[in-house]
Amino acid sequence: MPIMIYLAGPDVFLPNAIEVGKKKMAICEEFGFEGLFPADNDFGAKAGSAAIFRANCAKMKRADIGVFNLSPFRGPSADPGTVFELGFLFSQNRPVYGYSNARKSYVTRVAAAAGPLQHRDGRPVDRDDRAVENFDLNDNLMIVEAICASGGEIAFPPEGQDAFASTALETIPAFRACLEIVRRRFH
C-alpha cells in the first residue's frame, strides 16, 4: 500500500482547482505515493463550511504525511487554512513538508507588503509599531519549526522558476522537489 500524502495549499482556490488536484495526485503516483487533495471543491458551490471541514479532517486522518504549498497567499505568509492543516498533521505526529515559490525571508516579504520597516530596540517593526519576526526563516517560525521538528524540509523550485507555471498545470518544480525529498526519506 502506498504512503498517503495530504496535499494542502491555496490551490483549492484556483479556477481550475480540481484539474490541479488531479495533476498533483498523478505526480504523487509517479513518485510512488497516493495523494489526497482537499475536498473543498468536491462538494460544489453550495457546500457548507462544516461539511468541507469534516471531510478535510477525515482526509488528514488517513494521511501518513503532509505536503504543504507555503507560497505566500494574499499577503507575505502562507494561506491560513493550509497552516491550520499543517498544525493538525503535526499534532498527529505525522511528518510535514513544505514547498514555496518564495525564497526570500519572511521579514523581507513583510517589508515589501507593509512598507519599509523601522527598528525599535534592535527589532524590526511595521508601520503600526508591531514587531516583525526576524529569524531569517522563510515564514513564521511556528510553520518552519514544525516542519523541522517533524523531520521535514521546505523545498523551492530551481533558481529562476516559479512553483506555478502560468497554467498551474505545467511542471510544478517546487512540488516535485518536495516529493523527491519525501521519496528519499521514505523509500
Image (spheres, grey):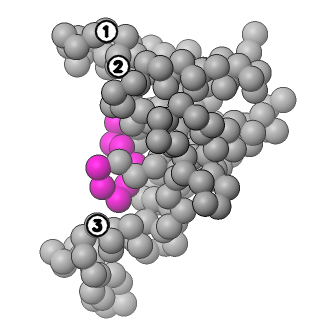
Label 1: which secondary element: loop
Residue in view at x 66 percent, y 26 percent? 27
Q: Which residue is mark 1?
A: 43
Marks 1 and 2 sit apart, C-alpha to C-alpha, by 7 Å
Label 2: which secondary element: loop
The answer, for residue 87, to whether it is visible in the render is: no
Q: Nearer the viewer, residue 172 or 28?
A: 172
Quarter in which the C terminus is drawn = top right
Residue 50 as seen in the image, left or right of residue 82: left
Residue 186: within the magenta? no
Residue in view at x 62 percent, y 29 percent? 65
Residue 52 place in picture, x, y as percent: 31, 16
Which numbered circle lies on residue 90? Answer: none
Q: Which residue is mark 3?
A: 113
Position of 26 relative to 104 (above/below): above
Asked whether disc 3 touches disc 1, contact meaning CB atoms under 8 Å apart, the reply is no
Residue 64 place in picture, x, y as percent: 63, 24
Residue 80: within the magenta? yes
Specify few, some or many for label 2: CA neighbours under 10 Å numbering under 14, 14-19, or 20 or more.
many
Q: Nearer the viewer, residue 51 or 72?
A: 72
The earlier-in-sequence mark between 3 and 2 is 2
Q: Which residue is mark 2?
A: 40
Position of 6 relative to 43 (above/below): below
Residue in view at x 67 percent, y 55 percent? 158
Marks 3 and 2 sit apart, C-alpha to C-alpha, by 28 Å
Quarter in which the N terminus is drawn = top right
Asked whether disc 3 touches disc 2, contact meaning CB atoms under 8 Å apart, the reply is no
What is the span of residues highlighted in magenta in the rendered image?
Answer: 74-81
Marks 3 and 1 sit apart, C-alpha to C-alpha, by 34 Å
Label 3: which secondary element: helix
Callout 1 amino acid: Phe
Residue 127 place in picture, x, y as percent: 18, 77
